[in-house]
Amino acid sequence: MNTHVTATHLQTLLDSPLPDPALILQSGAPTIVDSGELGDEHQSLVIVTRNELREQLPKDRDCSQSDLEFHAASLESTVSGLGG
């Protein structure tokens, strides 16, 4: 089971055509879904939403691969801490 959060996951989240995408842990793997379709039972499995991620990224410039890798590592640490 690959619970590893990567910069690619975050870039896919940012580029998602979904109206309100979220990166969640589903069946042990990071998956992007429309957060509007999540039931209450899945709320604790949300790793980050696109809006939350945008708030954490630099506002004065385009985000770089390094920015995404930094945030992926931070989120990975959080997921690991939850036992994911």
Image (cartoon, grey):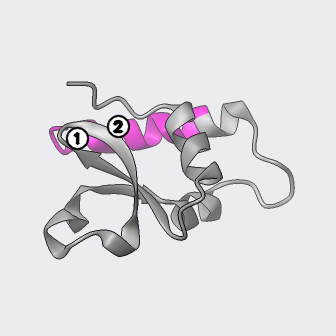
**Vertical relation: 57 (above or below) 64:** below
**Vertical relation: 55 (above or below) 74:** below
Q: Looking at the picture, tell me which residue is in the foreground, 4 or 81.
A: 4
Q: Which residues are magenta?
A: 69-84
Q: Tell me what residue is drawn at x 62 percent, y 38 percent.
A: 68
Could you classify mark 1 by the number of other residues whose Cα lies within 10 Å: few (under 14), some (14-19), or many (20 or more)?
A: few
Residue 14 x, y percent position in the rendering:
62, 52
Name the side, left or right, on which 37 lies relative to 28. right
Amino acid marked by disc 2: Ser
Name the side, left or right, on which 81 lies relative to 21. left
Q: Tell me what residue is drawn at x 36 percent, y 44 percent.
A: 31
Seen as rendered, the residue at the extreme right is 61
Residue 72 x, y percent position in the rendering:
49, 37
* Label 1 residue SS: helix
Location of residue 83 by image quarter: top left
Residue 12 x, y percent position in the rendering:
57, 43
Q: Quadrant of the C terminus?
A: top left
Q: Looking at the picture, tell me which residue is in the foreground, 82 or 6.
A: 6
* Residue 74 is covered by the magenta coloring: yes
Label 1, label 2: how far apart the Cα atoms are: 6 Å
Location of residue 78 by image quarter: top left
Could you classify mark 2 by the number of other residues whose Cα lies within 10 Å: few (under 14), some (14-19), or many (20 or more)?
A: some
Residue 13 x, y percent position in the rendering:
54, 50
For the residues labelled 1 and 2, say whether their Cβ atoms are less than 8 Å apart: yes
Q: Which mark is residue 81?
A: 1
* Label 2 residue SS: helix
Residue linked to disc 2: 77
Q: Tell me what residue is drawn at x 20 percent, y 63 percent.
A: 42
